[in-house]
Amino acid sequence: MATADQIKSLIRSHFSNETERFFTIALQVAAHEAKQGHPALAHDIRDIVDREHKKRGPKVLNFPQDLRGLVLTEDPQVSKTALVIQTSLQERIQQVIHEYRQQNKLKSFGLSHRRKILLIGPPGTGKTMTARVLAKELHLSLHTIQVDRLVTKFMGETSAKLRQIFNLMQQEHGVYLFDEFDAIGGERSMDNDVGEMRRVLNAFLQFIEQDTSDSLIVAATNNPKLLDQALFRRFDDVLYYDVPTSEERKCLIENVLGVFKASKFVWKAVLADSEGLSHAEIDQACRDAIKKAILSDTTKVNALSLLESLHNRQDARKGQRGDN
Ligand SMILES: Nc1ncnc2c1ncn2[C@@H]1O[C@H](COP(=O)(O)OP(=O)(O)O)[C@@H](O)[C@H]1O
Ligand SMILES: [Mg+2]
């Protein structure tokens, strides 16, 4: 059975019309039941919550007018199993999910769930995807803040806009992703636009430190060197992403090709020639190969056709770097 605290919280959130809170507690009850060895009940509760969520459709948000275009909102449906990352990263993401679901229990001991997370790694390795998975798992909307636009377009007003976004986090419970975060996170001592950038970064540091909302704050960057050391301390967790290992490449290719994978598939050359490519590039190469197969009416992708697509991706990458 649900704990006395959970029942009281459910009743309270029902009467104060806090629907999102009600959903969260219902999911905590499900987690509790699963732990007590009642998986069928846990599954049923999650099902009810999922169905209600879908019925309600996308929420109408009270975004201030001037944040429109700076914050993109979606309800992602990306499954956790599609994300191919090292086991240690998987465990840490699971920990964020677990603590979020058990936040009331932690709060009753004066502790807060880990909810300020910095993701660092090369492009196309799953940082944005992780934010989507977190939102899906926690039944929250994902609000992506377009940091580059926030900073360049409204240089003088950036701090004011940041304040509005942090206010929003209090009211609109969700996952907030600061993508391309280095646009604010740049070294405070760097000389370009020093005064303004320093003010913006200081404001951000202060906001993130003072923030006591229940929202998850995820910041993602390809460029950790640009980040000020002071920032790292403000996060509950810092996760490092990288291009996939051979084993991860195999898993990713299996996932993406799915039923299109030819039954006799020779891995050796595929794994060798995909080395150094990001998850996103390999994902695209697989999709290119699937499209080719469909259009030539074969519907199966063999190693040879995937190799060709992988080589095209390798060439595209060299072109980008300006190599020959
Ligand atoms: N770790 C991963 N596992 C599975 N697919 C991935 C992974 N990383 C990237 N992808 C694929 O590439 C796309 C772009 O990745 P994204 O998460 O936006 O990269 P990043 O934010 O790190 O630049 C994803 O939508 C997904 O299709
Ligand atoms: Mg990204």
Image (cartoon, rainbow, N blue to C red):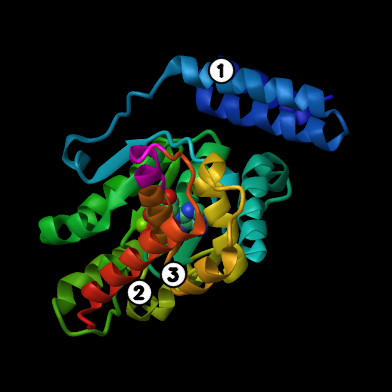
1 or 3: tag closer to the N-terminus? 1
Mark 3 element type: loop
At mark 2, the secondary structure is loop
Marks 1,2: beta carbons within 8 A: no
Q: Foreground residue, 257 or 148?
A: 257
Range of magenta residues: 290-297
Residue 314 at x, y percent in the picture: 34, 70
Q: Is mark 1 within 8 Å of ligand 1?
A: no
Pointers 3 and 2 in contact (C-beta within 8 Å): no
**Which is nearer the eye, 80 or 16?**
80
User: Relative to 302, is 102 above or below?
Assistant: above
| Label 2 sits on residue | 223
The image quadrant where one finds the N terminus is top right
The residue lying at 66 percent from left, 30 percent from top is 27
Q: Amino acid at mark 3?
A: Gly
Is there a contact, CB below 8 Å, between mark 1 and mark 3? Answer: no
Q: Is residue 291 magenta?
A: yes
Main secondary-structure element of the magenta-colored stretch = helix
Residue 131 locus on image (x, y percent): 46, 49
Q: Residue 298's x, y, as percent?
A: 44, 40
- Does 219 lie within the magenta span? no
Real-space CA distance between mark 3 and mark 2, rounded to the nearest whole angstrom: 7 Å
Circle 1 packing at 10 Å, graded few (<14), some (14-19), many (20+), is: few
Task: Please name the residue that numbered disc 1 is placed on.
Answer: 51
Left or right: residue 178 compared with residue 256: left
Q: Quadrant of ligand 1?
A: bottom left
